[in-house]
Amino acid sequence: IIQRASHEGAVVGIAIDSLNKTVVTVGADSKLVLWNFVTHMPNKKSPIMLPSPATKLTHVRDSDLAAIAMQDFGVAVFDCSSLSIVRYFGGSRYASPNEMRLSHTGPISDMGFGPDGRKLFTSSLDGTIRVWDVP
């Protein structure tokens, strides 16, 4: 099971949930892997396949959400409490036509959550900044 869950290539982001129970890693292999903080073993839900290779990860402990930037210029929002992806923004695979119009057209350079965790701010090498509503 460790072989199946481990990354094949670069690990580009890591976060620890607010209860110190789960370590979340994302990689250039499009895998999101959940690890038990104590045993260092992969969670049975691992790996979760992302629609595109990950390039960056940011986490906010207050809401226990993690944002994962991907090579298709989209962002996945992962809930570290429920251990599931709860939202996609932009990108080529999961965006609605309206979101595609608002999506970045270049690599995401940075991300950050607002103080209450309800907004996600992304910047891109295309010269744009986007503000996404996180439910």
Image (cartoon, grey):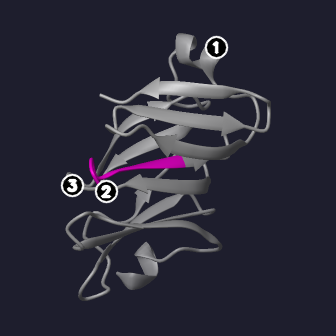
The part of the image, by quadrant, that contains residue 113 is: top left
Q: Read off the magenta span.
A: 61-68
Residue 62 in magenta stretch:
yes
Percent coordinates x, y for residue 23 in the rendering: 35, 72
What distance separates the C-alpha of mark 3 from that of mark 2?
11 Å
SS for callout 1: helix
Q: N-terminal of the two: label 2 or label 1?
A: 2
| Residue displayed at 61% across by 17% down | 102
Query: What's the mark number on residue 81?
Result: 3
- Name which residue type carries label 3: Ser
What distance separates the C-alpha of mark 2 from that of mark 1?
31 Å
Q: Say if 68 sits above or below 118 in the image.
A: below
Q: N-terminal of the two: label 3 or label 2?
A: 2
Q: N-terminal of the two: label 3 or label 1?
A: 3
SS for callout 3: loop
The residue at which mark 1 appears reads as 101
The part of the image, by quadrant, that contains residue 80 is: bottom left
